Image (cartoon, coloured by chain):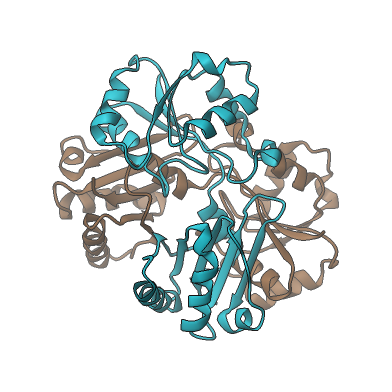
Chain colours: A brown, B cyan
Amino acid sequence: MSALYLIPLPIADLQNAHEFILPQVRQVIATTDYYLVENLRTARRFIAWLKTGRSIDALHFFLLNKNTSSEEVASYFQQIPPQASVGLMSEAGCPGIADPGQWAVKYAHQTGRRVVPLVGPSSIVLALMASGLNGQQFVFHGYLPVARQERISALRRLEKEALQGITQIFIEAPHRNDHIIEDMLAHLRPHTLLCIAAQLTAPEELICTKTISQWQAQKPHLGKVPAVFLLGTW
Amino acid sequence: MSALYLIPLPIADLQNAHEFILPQVRQVIATTDYYLVENLRTARRFIAWLKTGRSIDALHFFLLNKNTSSEEVASYFQQIPPQASVGLMSEAGCPGIADPGQWAVKYAHQTGRRVVPLVGPSSIVLALMASGLNGQQFVFHGYLPVARQERISALRRLEKEALQGITQIFIEAPHRNDHIIEDMLAHLRPHTLLCIAAQLTAPEELICTKTISQWQAQKPHLGKVPAVFLLGTW
């Protein structure tokens, strides 16, 4: 039966990624001809690297990024035979989470196509598991405001919730990592817990949960790496 | 280097689970002697089923469930050689999320042990991906109150947030699935979207996002199966 397969991509360099690819993902890619992808180059590179024996040139790719309208998504599906399966891929990690893939899933639900999510790496979940913070109640905020004063207000609001035991998760554009860390060390309370989870699944993976005052004593410098931040309490 | 490995378990019957086990998980289990586990039988059965060639009798298991105190967790680690790696397993899915595993992770952070989360199935993430609802901002609430009036109030509060575009995710004890569905169909607004994601990764997997009024027209009867519920808007 045809389906929309939600295909997770590795979240670190492809070099070590074989350890993170499920047999199921390989199987789906070996038998799917149509793809909606956030980034053409990443998707083609990933499929080629899997060496399933398929020729990349025989596959059909449609671009689905933050500029794609829901009309365009509909027109993509109209170009795909109804009995054909479709693969959805974001730039990294699980499609539909912190990316624009949800519009394809919405279309599938509205037109009665089966939706099949495949298991793979999610930096949000890996960070939450490894933080040691409350995993029974949590909020994911995506990106915080870019303007400094608004960002500081947002951090303070999140801290209030975090201190009530609801883990607060957010991400930041890599080039702003060290700025947001600076803001947290300057404006949050000494006993609030901050988990920094960076370069997940890479050999350089760093996951560390400490109080703000412990971080102040040993300031982290992440640089431009993918990172997830979590605030909470024990 | 020794570590606390967070080992995800299958979320459906073991029969089809080979497709969901990463090479990495197999490797860690083949070389780890000490385990903190939510359920002894499930953990032993899973390790035996993996057929890594290890004798189950040579492994050491410590029980970490909702009744385990942080003193007990500390005493477990004191019985484990400091250079030995430890595996943490919950009853199903990712340890540390919607389970008591976080206390072991907390201990590891506080004593400077490396924490390594492994990739595996999380029903929350699979449900969110496949719901088509907003994956850029979401809240996981765990279980809602059991008492009916409180549960209805909670559902209404969640609906308000959901209609602002923040996806609301919660779970229910399987024997109460049909009760909570009844409450939602009776008390939420006609255009609110409800995604029901049940038996994820099993052959019977059901994932469907519809408005409350669409669900009212075709009432779902889940029965006692593992399910995740999501409220949101498009």
Q: Residue B181: image x %, image y %?
A: 53, 72
The front one of B26 and B188 is: B188
Q: Residue A104: image x %, image y %?
A: 66, 67
The front one of A116 and A55 is: A116
Q: Looking at the image, which residue is at 85% across and 64% down? A: A83
Left or right? Give the position of B183 relative to A36: left
Q: How many marks?
A: 0
Q: Residue B3: image x %, image y %?
A: 40, 24
Does residue B217 appear in the picture of this structure?
yes
Q: Residue B69: image x %, image y %?
A: 26, 36
Q: Looking at the image, which residue is at 80% across and 47% down? A: A56
Quadrant of residue A146 in the image?
bottom left
The front one of B27 and B182 is: B182
Q: Looking at the image, which residue is at 57% across and 23% down? A: B27
Does residue B233 appear in the picture of this structure?
no
Quadrant of residue A208 in the image?
top left
Left or right? Give the position of A168 relative to B57: left
Q: Looking at the image, which residue is at 60% across and 82% down? A: B216
Q: Considering only vertical position in the picture, is A104 above or below A193?
A: below
What quarter of the picture does the N terminus of chain A occupy?
Answer: bottom right
What quarter of the picture does the C terminus of chain A occupy?
Answer: top left
Left or right? Give the position of B182 relative to A189: right
The front one of A140 and A49 is: A140
Quadrant of residue A150 in the image?
bottom left
